[in-house]
């Protein structure tokens, strides 16, 4: 039994290393692909311990509606946070950091729980860990689309971290 | 490991049906008398399914960018897994909990952008909406944040109503599309969560 657990642990470690390595590579590749002035402020890179972003996507929605952006952000050696997100001009009226969470009631009880959504000042990224921006949790809230977001499109999302670093990633628009 | 295996074997030995992915309530809720006006006028105001069919009812709002689209997209994918005959017996209803901002056309466009044949429901009368929400065991709350913008909280569940107006199952937020499909297939075949069935070999409940 003990042997099995140890094997599993070391396997997990190997997987984690592979995932982290591929995250770092992806992030470098994405930053490199950005190639416009919005990334020039970025001083990120795995070497500086800046957060790496993986699997960024934005929900397809029509002009006038709201949408949300999701991704996984893996931190460097020190704790960090996303303090702002921006989209290219002409995409939306406003972009905010949000968190959805469950509140009140109990599913199957007298009254079911509710989902609520609040604006947050920052999305914390734990040191050496990662934070998932995912449906029902943290997300980048896109308010009042001034253009259609259709599946397959790429949308640059610029994140500002508490360190002051900025990084622009290309998020894929999906029907979600 | 051995203990777990034994437990699992024990469960199988009881010959209980595999549980549904969704949850059910005891006593079961009825929404047979509940209605919220259907947008467009050609839809059914009530939530009772056609004979042998099911209605899937969701309480949401159109400026919801995260929770509602997630569930409605997963629902669309779940419905796509059904055989055409099964799919034809399932109706989808979207009820807005934010009628002040969700004008009829906006609401209808939103609902049908996820599920083409969805019926949207909307009432300006808060009592009509509250009665409907309560009957399902759902909930919603609209408050104003520090910027003066409305903040809407609402149950993330999807409710399944049968042809007698009984809420036979509910799926919580985050239910995978595949679970929606497999629960629907069983419900459409006439199976019900074991705590709801009055026949079928279950021991009579003491309470
Ligand atoms: Cu939001």
Image: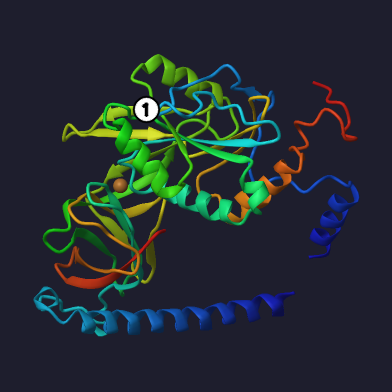
In-front residue for pair B112/A33: B112
- On whether ligand 1 comes within 8 Å of the CB at mark 1, the answer is no
In-front residue for pair A111/B28: B28
In-front residue for pair B7/B13: B13
| B156 up-or-down from B206: above or below | below
Indicate the position of residue B112 as horizontal and vertical percent values: 41, 44
Task: Name the quarter where the N terminus of chain A is drawn.
Answer: bottom right
Q: Is residue B187 left or right of residue A83?
A: right
Q: In this view, does B20 lie to the left or right of A31?
A: right
Indicate the position of residue A24 as horizontal and vertical percent values: 34, 81
Indicate the position of residue A111 as horizontal and vertical percent values: 53, 27
Note whether residue B176 is visible.
Answer: no
Q: Based on the displayed image, in which of its 4 quarters is residue A41 positioned? A: bottom left
Task: Tell me the residue that label 1 is attached to.
Answer: B141
| A17 up-or-down from A38: above or below | below
Task: Name the quarter where the C terminus of chain A is drawn.
Answer: bottom left
Q: How is the image coloured?
A: rainbow
Note whether residue A130 is visible.
Answer: yes
How many numbered markers are drawn? 1
Indicate the position of residue A117 as horizontal and vertical percent values: 33, 42
Helix or strand or loop: what does disc 1 sit on?
strand
The chain to which mark 1 is attached is B
Q: How crowded is mark 1: few (under 14 residues within 10 Å), some or many (20 or more)?
A: some
Picture residue at 12% right of the left edge, 58% below the top: A90
In-front residue for pair B73/A47: B73
Picture residue at 48% right of the left edge, 42% below the top: B117
Q: Residue furthest front?
A: B42
């Amino acid at each position: 039994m003990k042997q099995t657990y140890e094997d599993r642990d070391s396997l997990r470690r190997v997987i984690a290393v592979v995932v982290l390595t591929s995250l770092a590579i992806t992030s470098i590749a994405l930053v490199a692909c950005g190639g416009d002035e919005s990334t020039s402020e970025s001083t990120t890179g795995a070497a500086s311990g800046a957060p790496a972003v993986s699997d960024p996507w934005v929900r397809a929605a029509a002009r006038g509606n709201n949408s949300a952006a999701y991704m996984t952000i893996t931190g460097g050696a020190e704790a960090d946070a996303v303090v702002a997100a921006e989209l290219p001009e002409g995409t939306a009226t406003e972009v905010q950091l949000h968190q959805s969470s469950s509140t009140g009631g109990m599913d199957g009880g007298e009254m079911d729980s509710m989902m609520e959504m609040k604006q947050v000042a920052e999305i914390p990224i734990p040191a050496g860990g990662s934070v998932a921006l995912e449906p029902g949790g943290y997300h980048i809230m896109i308010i009042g689309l001034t253009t259609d977001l259709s599946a397959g499109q790429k949308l640059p999302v610029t994140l500002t971290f508490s360190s002051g670093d900025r990084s622009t990633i290309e998020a894929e628009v999906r029907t979600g | 490991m051995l203990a777990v295996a034994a437990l699992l074997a024990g469960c199988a030995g009881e010959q209980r049906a595999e549980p549904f992915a969704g949850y059910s309530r005891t006593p079961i809720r009825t929404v047979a008398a509940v209605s919220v006006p259907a947008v467009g006028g050609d839809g059914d105001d009530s939530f009772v399914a056609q004979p042998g069919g099911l209605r899937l009812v969701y309480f949401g709002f159109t400026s919801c960018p995260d929770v509602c689209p997630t569930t409605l997209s997963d629902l669309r994918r779940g419905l796509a897994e059904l055989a055409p005959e099964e799919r034809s017996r399932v109706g989808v209803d979207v009820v807005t909990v934010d009628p002040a901002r969700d004008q009829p056309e906006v609401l209808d466009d939103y609902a049908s952008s996820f599920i083409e044949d969805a019926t949207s429901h909307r009432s300006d009368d808060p009592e009509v909406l509250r009665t409907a929400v309560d009957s399902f065991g759902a909930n919603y709350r609209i408050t104003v944040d520090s910027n003066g913008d409305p903040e809407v909280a609402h149950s993330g569940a999807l409710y399944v109503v049968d042809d007698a107006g009984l809420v036979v199952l509910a799926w919580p937020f985050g239910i995978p599309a595949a679970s929606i499909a497999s629960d629907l297939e069983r419900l459409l075949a006439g199976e019900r969560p074991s705590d709801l069935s009055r026949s079928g070999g279950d021991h009579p409940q003491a309470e």
